[in-house]
Amino acid sequence: MNHPLSVGYEPQEAAAGAEAAVALSVVMPGLDEAQTLAVCIEKARRSLGGLNCSGEIIVADNGRTDGSQQIAPSLGARVVHVEDKGYGSALTRGTVAARGSYVIVGDPDDGYDFVNLGPFVEKLREGYELLMGNRVIIPMVAALLLGRQIIFSGCFVSVLRRRR
């Protein structure tokens, strides 16, 4: 089977004028995170390079004013401009623009371990279609160390199989 995440997978030729498909898209929605964007892109690139699958990195630009739009392409990421304001709009447009059969979504604030996408890819290779990771452990540990209650709404990295 020519599974998108199998080692040696070769995407089918794209039709004339269409963009070639990739196995895995890493989508980073957000706003004004220039201080951490480059680190996140580099981590995702390293991870994609070690996974033996084709991939792309997309930065969904929702009106950034901090120069992120120039940082992303200089590191090989594709910028998707999102006119509608709000995190949900950036998340949606970035995911829709993804060419991958599978999409990993995480904020570019260096709170997610983009360098370690392997466990997600392993589960996708096993047939899982939706995976959720979280970073709730960080506030829990911080609360224990600081002896304070920390209110945390929960932040997730999402991984999903696209339906075309």
Image: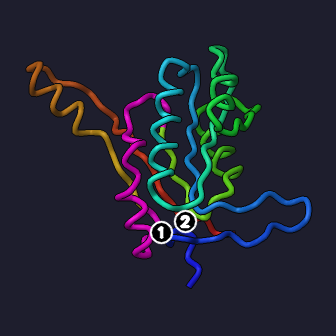
Q: Who's the residue at 44% across and 68% down the image?
A: 124
**x and y, in percent, of residue 5 in the image:** 52, 68
Name the colour scheme. Answer: rainbow
Which SS class for mark 1? loop
CB contact under 8 Å: marks 2 and 1:
yes
Pointer 1: residues within 10 angstroms few (<14), some, or many (20+)?
some
Q: Residue placed farthest to the bottom in the image?
A: 1
Check the image and report above or below for 93 versus 148: below
Tell me the magenta residue range: 107-130
Location of the C terminus by quadrant is bottom right
Q: Who's the residue at 69% across and 25% down the image?
A: 69
- Would you identify the image quadrant in which residue 27 lies? top right
Q: Residue placed farthest to the top in the image?
A: 66
Alpha carbon distance from label 2 to label 1: 5 Å
The residue type indicated by label 1 comes to Glu
Q: Who's the residue at 23% across and 33% down the image?
A: 138
Is 145 displayed left or right of 135 in the figure?
A: left
Check the image and report above or below for 108 versus 91: above
Please name the residue that numbered disc 1 is placed on.
129
Which one is nearer the viewer's eye here, 66 or 31? Answer: 66
Which one is nearer the viewer's eye here, 61 or 67? Answer: 67
Which one is nearer the viewer's eye here, 103 or 154? Answer: 103
Please name the residue that numbered disc 2 is placed on.
161
Ranked by sequence position, the earlier of labels 2 and 1 is: 1
Q: Who's the residue at 55% across and 71% down the image?
A: 8
Pointer 2: residues within 10 angstroms few (<14), some, or many (20+)?
some
The residue type indicated by label 2 comes to Arg
**x and y, in percent, of residue 142 in the image:** 17, 26
Check the image and report above or below for 60 versus 100: above
- Would you identify the image quadrant in which residue 77 lies? top right
